[in-house]
Image (cartoon, rainbow, N blue to C red):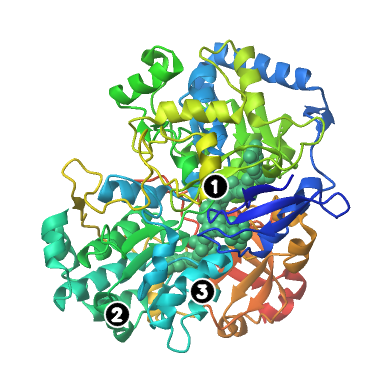
Amino acid sequence: MPAATHCPYCALQCAMTLVPNPQGPAPVRVEPRMFPTNRGGLCTKGWTSAELLTTPDRLTSPLIREQGGLRPATWDEALGRIAAQLRAIRREDGPDAVAVFGGGGLTNEKAYLLGKFARLALGTSRIDYNGRFCMASAAAAGNRAFGIDRGLPFPVDDLDGADAILLLGSNVAATMPPLLSHLAGARAEGGLIVVDPRRSQTAQLTADGAGLHLQPAPGTDLVVLLGLTHIVLAEDLADLDYLAARTVGVEEVRRSVAAWWPERVQAATGVPVALLRATARTLAASRNAFILTGRGVEQHVDGTDTVTAAINLALVLGLPGTPGSGYGTLTGQGNGQGGREHGQKCDQLPGYRRIADPAHRTAVAAVWGVDPAILPGPGVPAVELLGLLGARGGVRALLVHGANVVVSGPDVARTRAGLAALDLLVVCDFVLSETAALADVVLPVTQWAEEEGTMTNLEGRIIRRRRALDPPDGVRSELEILADLAARLDAPSVWPTDPAEVFAELARASAGGLADYSGLSHELLDAQLDEGIAAHWPYPIGSTGTPRLFLERFGHADGRARLVAVRPRELDRDDAGATPASRAVGQGEPSADLTLITGRLLEHYQSGAQSRRVPELSAAQPRARAELHPATAARLRIAEGDPIVLRNGRGAVRAVALLAERIRMDTVFLPFHFPDEECANLLTAAVVDPVSGMPEFKRTAVTVTRERSSESESAA
Ligand SMILES: Nc1nc2c(c(=O)[nH]1)N[C@H]1C(S)=C(S)[C@@H](COP(=O)(O)OP(=O)(O)OC[C@H]3O[C@@H](n4cnc5c(=O)[nH]c(N)nc54)[C@H](O)[C@@H]3O)O[C@H]1N2
Ligand SMILES: Nc1nc2c(c(=O)[nH]1)N[C@H]1C(S)=C(S)[C@@H](COP(=O)(O)OP(=O)(O)OC[C@H]3O[C@@H](n4cnc5c(=O)[nH]c(N)nc54)[C@H](O)[C@@H]3O)O[C@H]1N2
Ligand code: SF4
Ligand SMILES: [Mo]
């Protein structure tokens, strides 16, 4: 039977039908399906997604480490060993010696059960997930400004009516290609404005009068945004009626941007005054404008403040909560939205509830049938958690579900050392990812086409993932694994393994929370699929969902949005010496010091654990290539295709030089999809945004040289 489902990868969750294909290279064939986000389109990753189902190195048996290697084991042996070791560690060092690391790719059902498992079966406060690398700063800024964090508080097709869209640090042409159809309206009006230190595929869409490209020095977006807000206020372009009726805090923001006149912003960021003014005026003159942020502006130590500055600009222009306009962040992972709502964040309980709030604890404990006093308190965010691995008084056992931290976490050498110092590393995956290869026990799990569940896409729309074929023998679902371990650990409460039952429990536990799913069920979602109804949360019992938030009020008690005054970071704290600002205006001696920014290629997904195993994708992008400006390359005596090394105090990465005029001369771009000696995160630092705990993936000081074999020439 064909199954109407969605792509396994990103948050656009493009709709597809999986058709049985017994004769084909993969057991099912992917057919695109009409849906508001993708309109029948798919990117190359979606088209090839079924090939991973039968990848030759698919895991089909638990593995246990013995004498340095991994050997197959029975489920009973593997789970028995995990339970025994967890019990012993807990007895010796207490429940916080065991930690859990989740993922934004997990279904809502898995993410919910994982949070419950950590709190009830392990009793640990130490759970967090890879969404901390992805959504944490935008979430923190959204909560601060609006009192609710839903990536897009409006359906994606609202963008169609826009005549201006300011897209900050997002390369949707590579990261969500079908979304481009929603930008066509703004392009036709000349209103697509892209802010990126690279002339990315998305920035190239602004050519020929379709819009503007602002190319600031990496990490200076906050200053750009202060400058834009300054111009809007100084030129009397602000929506004063809206500010008075719907917000608080504009006077502080007015004062905070007063000193950021355009010439000063140009000097600090490299963006010409004329472009700054044109941007502010285009946004202010448009009837329907949107401001959208992506990881380029968020993955910084000041990411929360930068998103706050973007929201301030949106509020000054009167966009959020105004029909046909708005602010949003483009959620990344398949369930990056739902994954941040149901309890795998260290400070959170289901329904986007706070674990430190007594009323929230009581509500969830009642659904779980336990005394709220047994729920642990808040834990620590992901980067801090990874820093506790193997430390004295830290974590001795780690369970990983849906993340490949030795490729995608910051400062990979630190994480590798932490993992090596553990007594027990358990990884659930369907392939032997680089992290799974280090585990003491590996548990093979089902893939997307083999399971039922729900995902919440970038619009806060809850959709169904449907089973199209049986999993291979030997593979179990994560729900079964968690229930089995919970029983072995004598956990209280019930541990359903049927995804529909888990969803029903999640719905009850979320009732009354911000992300209320209580009116939904698998059954209703299936019916909605056929009727094409949009199940955006909050969806309390008796409602029909909330496609658009904030039309009448924001999430704070007084219904008003908050403008929060923010200031730029110290631009000279870079560990390589020269500041981006000084480079922006061409000061300083020529040197090999560059600012590394990292990001994505169309063909690969995240750590590459999945996409590197799909032949077409890995053939298209087999190796890490580092983008350098030809002038920079000439100065460093690097030619197209040369093997190069990027280096700093944390490590060295090998890559192939890719010369491209599209990048700033002071910047080098490296994709993070590759492992081992090509792993970009050998260079990134475990420094985080103080509000959100999000690491700085997008601004790292490096030196770049040709590889040693030709060192004689470059040294001359
Ligand atoms: N092909 C593909 N698609 C994906 C994914 C994938 O791995 N591969 N992952 C999914 C996930 S989880 C996510 S989070 C999204 C991410 O989607 P995006 O946010 O679009 O992805 P990135 O490539 O990380 O960063 C976007 C852009 O930010 C720019 N940038 C870097 N530093 C700065 C800076 O300081 N300022 C500004 N303004 N821009 C900067 C980069 O040059 C890059 O073009 O993609 C999703 N879709
Ligand atoms: N330098 C740099 N680093 C970055 C970023 C960047 O822009 N630059 N971006 C960051 C961002 S935005 C993100 S989201 C992270 C992503 O980083 P990761 O979480 O490491 O990314 P994935 O490769 O998606 O890892 C998911 C792993 O889980 C497995 N998996 C998939 N589905 C399931 C499931 O249902 N259950 C289980 N148990 N396993 C599953 C996959 O096979 C894979 O091995 O990377 C971050 N790291
Ligand atoms: S854009 Fe995202 S959801 Fe759509 S096919 Fe590509 S990876 Fe899948
Ligand atoms: Mo992400």
How crowded pointer 1 is (Cα within 10 Å; few <14, some 14-19, many 20+) is rated as some
Q: Amino acid at mark 1?
A: Leu
User: In the image, which disc is placed on residue 529?
Assistant: 1
Residue 123 coordinates in the image, percent (x, y): 49, 18
How crowded pointer 3 is (Cα within 10 Å; few <14, some 14-19, many 20+) is rated as many
Dots 2, 3 in contact, CB < 8 A = no
Mark 2 or 1, which is nearer the eye?
A: 1
Residue 281 coordinates in the image, percent (x, y): 26, 80
Single out the residue that lies furthest toward the right: 23
Which residue does the numbered mark 2 point to in the structure image? 282
Location of the C terminus by quadrant is: bottom right
Q: Establish if 544 lies above or below 621.
A: above
Q: Looking at mark 3, is its residue's CB closer than 8 Å to ligand 1?
A: yes
Q: Is residue 350 visible?
A: yes
Q: Tell me the residue at 61%/85% (across/down).
A: 634
Q: Amino acid at mark 3?
A: Thr
User: In the image, which disc is placed on residue 202?
Assistant: 3
Dot placed on the residue nearer the N-terminal end, 3 or 1 = 3
Single out the residue that lies furthest toward the bottom: 208
Describe residue 696's horizontal placement relative to residue 276 as left or right. right
Dot placed on the residue nearer the N-terminal end, 2 or 1 = 2
